[in-house]
């Protein structure tokens, strides 16, 4: 019984930190491309009183904002950069696990959980639903 509780806690901790890592690197992807275009980016973390999570007003956990003027093409590449980082994280773990024999099953499961969180973050951000990077990219393609 205690072993199952410890396993559930370990999974929850792995998912939480995997999600947090994906969020930070996702925003770093936006930041890097916006900085490349000279857009003067800034990453804003929206932390509520209860910690990280989606606030009641619908603000994301983190977002990259920039003050300099950009064109449609630059905005598209900036929006694409975040989900691209999530996809790259997923593919990196999959390739690593494909080529490296792991004797430590716990570490392997932790990496698999991280890969699952990364691909989920990719799909959730790339889908063209209101407020997502995918929605922004779709609208930018329509305008261009």
Image (tube, helix red, strand yellow):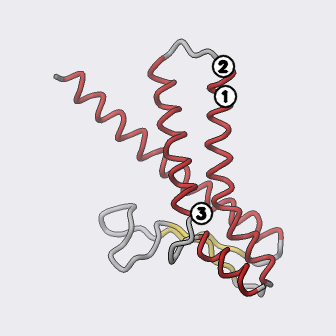
Of marks 3 and 2, which one's residue comes earlier in the chain?
Answer: 2
Q: Which mark is residue 100?
A: 2
Q: Residue 96 carries which label?
A: 1
How far separated are the C-alphas under marks 1 and 3? 24 Å
Q: Residue 120, relative to residue 78: is it above or below?
A: above
Q: 10 Å neighbourhood of mark 1: few (<14), some, or many (≥20)?
A: few
How far separated are the C-alphas under marks 3 and 2? 29 Å
Along the viewing direction, whichever of 57 and 144 lies nearer the viewer: 144
Q: What element carries label 3?
A: helix
Residue at point 68%, 47% (across, down): 88
Dot 1 and dot 3 residues touching (CB under 8 Å): no
Q: Where is residue 45 in the image (x, y as percent from the top left)?
A: 50, 68
Quarter-of-image position of residue 73: bottom right
Dot 3 and dot 2 residues touching (CB under 8 Å): no
Q: Where is residue 23 in the image (x, y as percent from the top left)?
A: 54, 57
> Residue furthest toward the left?
1
Q: Nearer the viewer, mark 1 or mark 3?
A: 3
Q: Is mark 2 on a helix, strand or loop?
A: loop
Residue at point 30%, 35% (across, down): 9
Dot 1 and dot 2 residues touching (CB under 8 Å): yes
Q: 10 Å neighbourhood of mark 3: few (<14), some, or many (≥20)?
A: many
Q: Residue 142 carries which label?
A: none
Q: In the rendered image, which quarter contains the N terminus?
A: top left
Of marks 1 and 3, which one's residue comes earlier in the chain?
Answer: 1
Q: Which mark is residue 126?
A: 3
């Amino acid at each position: 019984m205690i072993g199952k509780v410890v396993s559930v806690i370990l999974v929850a901790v792995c998912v939480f930190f995997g999600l947090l890592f994906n969020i930070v690197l996702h925003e770093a992807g936006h930041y890097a491309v916006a900085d490349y275009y000279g857009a003067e980016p800034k990453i804003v973390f929206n932390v509520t009183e209860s910690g990280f999570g989606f606030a009641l007003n619908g603000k994301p956990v983190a977002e990259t904002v920039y003050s300099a003027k950009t064109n449609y093409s630059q905005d598209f590449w900036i929006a694409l950069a975040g989900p691209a980082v999530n996809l790259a994280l997923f593919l990196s773990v999959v390739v690593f696990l494909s080529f490296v024999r792991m004797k430590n099953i716990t570490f392997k499961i932790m990496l698999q959980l991280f890969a699952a969180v990364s691909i989920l973050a990719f799909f959730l951000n790339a889908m063209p639903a209101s407020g997502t990077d995918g929605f922004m990219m779709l609208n930018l393609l329509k305008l261009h």
